[in-house]
Image (cartoon, helix red, strand yellow):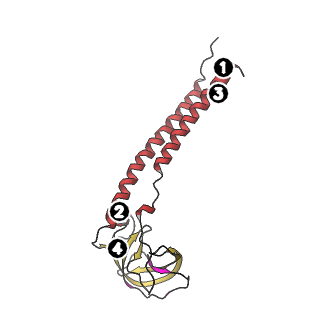
């Protein structure tokens, strides 16, 4: 007597496997998108023309890694966050929160690098530098007598999508193998 495949269990497993394979292909597509984005960021870093401070949203995304200039009308606060100097030394980035001339949302401005977390004095004014993720401005040249910070580098952004795709494909294969083993065990009557 031959036993039939359990219809509901088989349908659930096949649906799960199909979903995992679809997610794997989606991650492969995301990997290509991320590579194109990183190439765009790398090209933007080589552009010498200044762009207006982009603010938030899509404009900020389009301006990432470009040079910009910002007029800071008022400094709200200066904080210290972990930072890396241009020479690779670890220390502190001195970050000012600026209200731009002409209004708008406050802008984080990384003034420069220091070995000690002691606050610095900076009253605002013109700041030129690189638009970094956040968005924030990384001053170049540094301000307030600080050392230069490491340039924002798009290569620091992770692109793990290929490994995620491989994981989804392996999950699908594992689900199929486990299901086949379960069916064999069921057929043997164990």
Q: Tag 1: Cα neighbours inside 10 Å, few (<14), some, or many (≥20)?
A: few
Choose the circle earlier in sequence order: 2 or 3.
2
Task: Look at the numbered disc 2 and give the secondary structure of its residue.
Answer: helix
Highlighted range, magenta: 109-127
**Could you say where residue 79 lies in the image, as x and y percent from the top left?**
52, 80
Q: Is residue 147 left or right of residue 181?
A: left
Residue 18, disc: none
Q: Which residue is mark 4?
A: 53
Residue bearing the label numbered 2: 42
Q: Which mark is residue 187?
A: 1
Q: Tell me which residue sits at (63%, 27%) in the image.
A: 181
Which quadrant is home to the C terminus? Answer: top right
Residue 96 visible in this rendered orientation of the protein: no
Mark-to-mark CA distance, 2 and 4: 19 Å
85 is within the stretch colored magenta: no
Between disc 4 and disc 3, whose residue precedes? 4
Per the model, the C-alpha gap separating discs 4 and 3 is 60 Å
Residue that numbered label 3 is attached to: 182
Label 1 to label 3: alpha-carbon separation: 9 Å
Which residue of the protein is positioned furthest toward the left in this rendering? 49
Q: Position of residue 122 (x, y in %)?
A: 45, 87
- Compared to residue 38, the image places residue 91 above or below, namely below
**Residue 64 found in image quarter:** bottom left
């Amino acid at each position: 007597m031959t036993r039939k495949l359990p219809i509901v269990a088989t349908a659930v497993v096949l649906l799960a496997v199909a979903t995992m394979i679809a997610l794997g292909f989606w991650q492969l597509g995301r990997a290509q998108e991320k590579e194109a984005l990183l190439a765009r960021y790398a090209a933007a870093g080589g552009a010498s023309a200044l762009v207006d401070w982009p603010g938030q949203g899509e404009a900020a995304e389009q301006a990432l890694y470009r040079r910009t200039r910002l007029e800071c009308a008022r400094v709200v606060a200066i904080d210290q966050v972990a930072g890396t100097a241009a020479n690779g030394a670890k220390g502190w980035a001195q970050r000012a929160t600026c209200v731009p001339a002409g209004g708008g949302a406050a802008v984080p401005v990384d003034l420069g690098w220091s070995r000690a977390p002691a606050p610095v004095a900076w009253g605002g004014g013109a700041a030129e530098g690189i638009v970094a993720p956040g968005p924030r401005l990384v001053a170049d040249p540094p301000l307030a007598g600080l050392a230069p910070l490491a340039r924002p580098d798009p290569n620091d952004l992770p692109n793990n999508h290929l490994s995620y795709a491989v994981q989804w494909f392996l999950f699908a294969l594992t689900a199929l193998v486990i299901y086949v083993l379960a069916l064999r065990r069921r057929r043997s009557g164990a």
